[in-house]
Amino acid sequence: MMIQKVYTIPADTDIYHKLPLVEENVGSLLVLLPGNPGLTNFYKCYLNLIQEAFPHFEILCPSNAGCDPASIQSLQLYGLEDQITHKYEIIRDLIQSSNKQNYDLYFLSHSVGSYFNQRVIKYLHEDQSLSGKYRIKFVGLLFPTIRNIGQSQNGIIFSTLFNYTPFVSFAIHASRVLFKLFPESYLRKFIKTYVIQKPVLDDSVSFRNFENSVTGALNIIKNPDIVKQVLSLAKEEMRDITEENEINDWFFGRKFDPEAKIWVYFGDSDRWVNHQTRDFLVKRYYEKSNKEVIFEIAHAKEGITHSFCVDKSVEFSRITIDILKSFFNDTA
């Protein structure tokens, strides 16, 4: 899979970028690739908590192209291939412009972000200009929609809506009407009451994450261009993310770096990843003797779901920190 075209990073890109709390000679870059909708608001608390545990991590989380509420939206929509190249380009430019001699890269990716992540890694691997400038040490695929997303419970529902109704047009129109009829303060209160679940934990970080999630949801609802971008990308996901064994074989075979650690975290019951898909991936790629590639299924009692970044960032950050410590002897 060679890159035929390098896109200019769209102006409508919000990038959450934090320098390390403690400097080291070798850069340690933790990159999170969001799912869809790909707004950074949903991931900030999660990433901040991980950085507190590993203060030498530099943090990078680019929004999906076309999902920055602060920018003037263009008429262009960004599909799967655009999103992949967009993220590759951001990471490539950061590595090339850094004064670090080399980078240790740690990836986390959520939902369709995992589909992006596999291909971003392949692009980086094939880029000769980056040879010797980085090493991929860890890749975490969180609730990954990397195969047959259209066959999941929600995938079937949305595929039907996309194929047989003017769903995208209706949602865009509804977004315009809602924001004309109701003040932002009312919509924020409605989201807090009925859309975003209040945190279970009674601590300041959980409530900060709650407020970030409310803001993220509000930014989607009030911006018809983001609604269009999110749903257009989702429509392409349902159609094009099917049975792609070649890239998965390459990725789980760690052809990019045989020493890289891989962590795959599935939901106990995930409406975006059906059991058949999950079981296929586990059966094909899990080896009990291989301690470098871990497949994990959430326990229902933990309450960690596909939308962890909305209401369980604190809880899931602890799980993520523990897996990083287990792989890298508490130091990452």
Image (cartoon, rainbow, N blue to C red):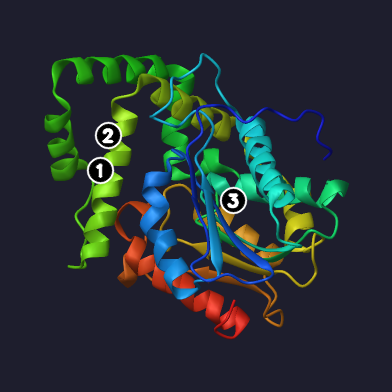
Residue at 50% across / 73% down in the picture? Answer: 54
The residue type indicated by label 1 comes to: Val
Q: Tell me the quarter of the picture where residue 305 sits.
A: bottom left
- Give the image location of residue 275, x and y in percent: 51, 57
- Dot 2 amino acid type: Leu
Q: Left or right? Give the position of 331 relative to 122.
A: left
Residue matched to label 1:
214
- Distance CA(mark 3)–CA(mark 2): 25 Å
Which one is closest to the eye, mark 3 or mark 2? 2
- How far across and how far down the image is residue 28, in percent? 62, 66
Q: Residue 105 in the image: x percent, y percent? A: 66, 62
Q: Which residue is mark 3?
A: 114
Residue tagged 2? 218
| Rendered image quadrant of residue 259 | bottom right
- Among the two numbered marks 3 and 2 on one chain, the one whose residue lies closer to the N terminus: 3
Q: Name which residue lies at 22% across and 42% down.
A: 195
Q: Can residue 243 be seen in the rendering of this structure?
A: no
In the image shown, does 317 or 12 lie closer to the viewer?
12
Which label number is shown at residue 112?
Answer: none
Q: Work out whether residue 69 can be spotted.
A: yes
The kind of residue tagged 3 is Ser
Q: Is residue 58 above or below residue 274?
A: below
Q: Find numbered disc 2 in the image and state the secondary structure of the residue it sits on.
A: helix
Q: Is label 3 or label 1 in front?
A: 1
Residue for point 71% across, 61% down? 100
For residue 79, side relative to residue 136 (left or right):
left
- The residue at the point 60 percent across, 28 percent down is 79
Rendering coords of residue 140 (x, y %): 58, 62
CB of mark 2 within 8 Å of CB of mark 1?
yes
